Image: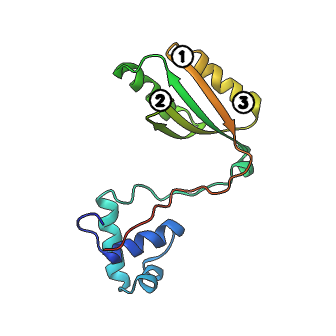
Amino acid sequence: MPVGMDRFDARILEALQLNARATAEALSDHVGLSADACRKRLARLRASGVIEAEIAVLDPASVGRGLILIVEVTLQHERKIALDRFKAAMQAAPEVMQCYYVTGHADFILILSARDMADYEDFTRRHFFAEDNVLRFRTSAVMDRVKTGFALPVDAA
């Protein structure tokens, strides 16, 4: 458990990961503290950056982005300027849902959405083929979203 966090914080975080819209009153029932105490803890967890964001998770197919792809990207040169340029391009690309700079045989792992294969091909032309520093990329198309999310286990003190 990180310094300054206790089991009440952990229980609040666990509950929020399941429902970010949970009220302080609902959290108080789950955690065993007053609603006011939960509000204060939530404010502290938000202000300290433990809670990075509270977002809506959309069904990709419902918004016309039903093709989810996992892409391994290997760069030709891992110089800082080249890495920073690629990172910035991926951060700016709305198709990229997640981008990880990793160790191993690839330099980056991307999770991205596309309308269809033609849409993905357009993405590859703009971001991989047009970028001299992309040595290769390998793509896997997701057949079934078995488990998705950002929930983390939160250890209690």
Numbered label attached to residue 84: none
Q: Marks 2/3: CA distance?
A: 23 Å
Q: Earlier in the sequence, mark 2 or mark 3?
A: 2
Outermost residue, left side: 3
User: Circles 3 and 1: CB distance less than 8 Å?
Assistant: no
Residue drawn 43% across and 23% down?
85
For label 2, the crowd category at 10 Å Cα-Cα, with few meaning under 14, some 14 to 19 and many 20 or more, is: some
Residue drawn 33% across and 81% down?
36
Which residue is disc 2 drawn over? 107
Give the x, y percent position of residue 24.
42, 78
60 sits to left or right of 127: right
Give the x, y percent position of residue 54.
47, 59
Which residue is disc 3 drawn over? 119
Q: Amino acid at mark 3?
A: Asp
59 sits to left or right of 151: right
Give the x, y percent position of residue 131.
54, 16
User: Circles 1 and 2: CB distance less than 8 Å?
Assistant: no
Marks 1 and 2: which is nearer the front?
2
